[in-house]
């Protein structure tokens, strides 16, 4: 299955590409908007700041390509800051693509960033998180999405309060953790993501 990673100029795209390849995908990193529009699955992955990442997407028209995909019902997966980019204004500065309603807020916890392994609690049945209830995955973030519609949340974690760990709605899905750094659970998530994209 062909998967393209939208290159906004930062992030750990090589490690995500390798993890997708192990999951059975033919993965490619691209700055080409037409390629992003056409692929069976587009992924926004990486680390960093929502505002700079959004600027990086816009520089090559990848923001509009991703919006066009979603409008046409073609699947998009966000990983870490890529999940935050699916939402709206961020307390860190800037705004995402507003594909899902709600802001991005700074984590209210004793320890920020939320760094390290934490277990998932699946909150709603979804192909994306099938088999992952109670599994440990790796987080590294200081901001978290706050969806307006609770129904989009499919998994959460606890870090002195709830952290939304995975969302899914129509052709849009995202995970706050890093599947490429999450060992067996991360590999299963990416396999699930490929299956989800075929059914989205």
Image (cartoon, grey):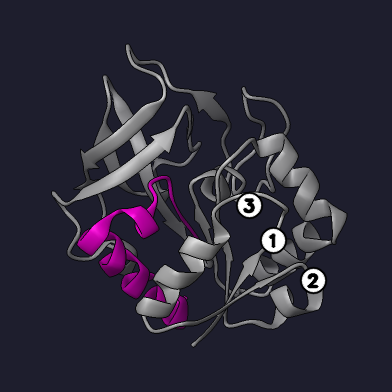
Position of 109 relative to 8 (above/below) = above
Mark 3 vs 1: CB contact within 8 A: no
User: Magenta segment, principal secondary structure?
Assistant: helix
SS category of the residue bearing label 3: loop
Residue linked to disc 2? 33
Mark 1 vs 2: CB contact within 8 A: no
Q: Residues within 10 Å of mark 3 (few under 14, many from 20)?
A: some
x then y, percent, for residue 51: 72, 36
Q: Marks 2 and 3, Cα distance to the nearest angstrom?
A: 17 Å
At horizontal 38% and vertical 59% (from top left) the residue drawn is 180
Q: Earlier in the sequence, mark 1 or mark 2?
A: 1
x then y, percent, for residue 17: 50, 70
Residue linked to disc 1? 7
Rendered image: mark on residue 70 = none
Q: Quadrant of residue 90?
A: top right
Residue linked to disc 3? 99
Magenta residues (range):
172-200
x then y, percent, for residue 170: 50, 65
At horizontal 29% and vertical 67% (from top left) the residue drawn is 187
Mark toward the viewer: 1 or 2? 1
Q: Earlier in the sequence, mark 2 or mark 3?
A: 2
Q: Marks 3 and 1, Cα distance to the nearest angstrom?
A: 18 Å
Q: Quadrant of residue 64?
A: bottom right
The front one of 12 and 96 is 12
């Amino acid at each position: 299955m062909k998967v393209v990673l939208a290159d906004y100029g930062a992030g750990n795209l090589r490690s995500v590409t390798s993890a997708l390849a192990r999951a059975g995908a033919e993965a490619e990193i691209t700055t080409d908007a037409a390629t992003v529009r056409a692929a069976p699955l587009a992924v926004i992955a990486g680390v960093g700041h929502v505002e700079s990442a959004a600027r990086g997407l816009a520089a090559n028209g990848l923001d509009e390509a991703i919006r066009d995909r979603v409008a046409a019902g073609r699947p998009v997966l966000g990983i870490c800051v890529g999940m935050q980019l699916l939402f709206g204004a961020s307390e860190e500065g800037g705004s995402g693509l507003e594909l899902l309603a709600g802001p991005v807020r700074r984590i209210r916890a004793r320890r920020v960033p939320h760094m390290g392994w934490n277990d998932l609690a699946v909150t709603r049945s979804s192909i994306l998180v099938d088999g992952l209830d109670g599994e440990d995955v790796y987080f590294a973030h200081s901001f978290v999405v706050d969806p307006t519609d609770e129904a989009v949340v499919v998994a959460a974690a606890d870090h002195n309060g709830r952290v939304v760990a995975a969302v899914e709605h129509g052709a849009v899905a995202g995970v706050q953790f890093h599947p490429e750094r999450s060992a067996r659970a991360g590999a299963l998530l990416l396999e699930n993501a490929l299956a989800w994209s075929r059914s989205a």
